[in-house]
Amino acid sequence: MGFEPTQYESDASPLIQDVSGAPWTPLFWHACTFNPTAFTEVMMNLIRNPNINSSWLFRADVLYENGTVPDEISDSEATLVRRLIPRNTLRDQPLDQTCLFYHSCEPDGQLDDSEQHMVVYIPHVSSPIEMPFYHPAVRGVAFLHEWNRSENTGRVSTHYCFFDDVERAPKLVRTAFHLLSTLHKHGQGTTTGYVKRVHHDVVVPQITMQNTYAKLKEKYARKLIGTWAEVTDPTKHVFEDLGIAAFLIELWKQMYQGTTFPGFVDIGCGNGLLVYLLRQEGYEGWGFDARKRKSWTNYNAKGETTPDSEDLPCLREHVLLPSIITAKEDVADSLDHDESDIDVQKLLHDGRFPEGTFIISNHADELTPWTPILAAISDCPFMMIPCCSHNLTGAKYRAPVPKDVDKSNSAYASLVIWVSGIAADCGWEVETEMLRIPSTRNTALIGRRRKPDGTDVQLDDIVQKYGGTAGYLDNVMKLVQVAPRSH
């Protein structure tokens, strides 16, 4: 069923009678095939996740909840008070709002095939000028679901309670259209068996992560965007790395509560912004990439050192040659490079880190499949965010589509499943978090615990299982000669 709602005439009679006498104006209606239970479930989800309806909002914090909406609709009502949290608290303030659930009752001794269910939003403001930008400037918003039990058909509609002397502005009408569209889409999805595939906030709670993100954004965003040294879009990269930094900070608070943070290393660190942000927030660590970036001048401030060296910058040029392949001494002489231009011995890094060092692999491309292997070699926890697909040789590679037909067959989904398999085979308990960042490549795979038998693995066998390493050195040394990746 497509979405083509009918707009009520401006003088249409109200469908909602308010005991206070406040007038409710109907805006749009549309036929539906989802029943009252589905309507209630969808509305509860929209209440708890207002960001579905508005990109200006982070989330809703539930301040009060009186009862719950039952699985089977009864005569009870439910009341929630939520606080809408905007993304930009410098521009907009949070808004408290009461959400009320109603449904009709059949008079005693009477039977009726029809029933009505309604959800009402009442913002805690007394005038239009108090209303933040992200909320329609009305006294209340209502969603009405009318259902015929014998025919299993119904319709949904949106209604406003306007402030006195406020006109029916086009923006308010468009908002009512959008609200009904979202309700209809999610309601109809329940009738087709839609199952939510993406689950956020599994590892780190939404509230703590978003609060930390908001603080970092307020503290750093303007300056970082204004001093951006790369040719890429500063807003995307700054906000993305602010989100990743916020997630890592909250993850580390969980992992290292009451203990000393062991330090981090960002392999394939790109522009170095994530390293800079984490160090600015007091977390010691460093990062490396095959080529220096323009941004490193800004982020490699003098005097910054790393836990393992007092005389090296926190952002360094290295090409990873994992110790499991061969020793640096065995390959340095075979490289066709002028040593007056490149000191190969200093350029190569064997991927061994002090035990416990947290390994970050953020869009590390060639290094992504190596991340859980390096973590197993040095007994280090890790987080990797896959992006472009490469195999263990460093060559571009399309991961095979999983045999499980319930899984997505997209190239990115296949890559995530493939590298998750490497991590699991290396003995890691793999946790998955869909990060709230402005990127479609937002799957974080975390390995912070080994399986009971996780240390009893043969890494050489795992490397061979996933294609071996033939040609690895030639492939990764090409990175020294080509333009750097933008991340």
Image (cartoon, rainbow, N blue to C red):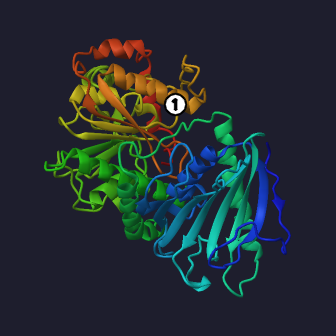
In the rendered view, tell whether residue 235 sits above or below residue 457. Answer: below
Classify mark 1: helix, strand or loop: loop
* Residue at x-position 71% and y-position 62%: 158
For label 1, the residue is 389
- Residue lying at the far front in this picture: please name it: 109
Which amino acid lies under the numbered mark 1 shown in the image of this protein? Ser
- Picture quadrant of residue 107: bottom right
* 418 vs 133: above or below: above
In the rendered image, the vertical position of residue 199 relative to residue 210, given as above or below: above
Q: Is residue 168 left or right of residue 223?
A: right
Residue 150 left/right relative to 186: right
Nearest the viewer among 94 and 183 is 183
Disc 1 residue crowd, few under 14, some 14–19, many 20+, Cα 10 Å: many
Q: Residue at x 23, y 44 (%)?
A: 255
Residue 380, given in percent of the width and then of the height, sits at 24, 34
- Which one is nearer the viewer's eye here, 483 or 250? 250
Residue 471 visible in the snapshot: yes
Whether residue 229 is visible: no
Q: Position of residue 285 (x, y in %)?
A: 25, 49
Image coordinates for residue 376, horizontal then vertical, percent: 26, 26
- Residue found at x 40% / y 51%: 244
- Expressed as whole percent of the image width and height from the top left, the position of residue 150 reads 76, 39
Quadrant where the N terminus is found in the figure:
top right
Closest to the observer, 181 or 73: 73
Q: Nearer the viewer, residue 324 or 205?
A: 205
Q: How many marks?
A: 1
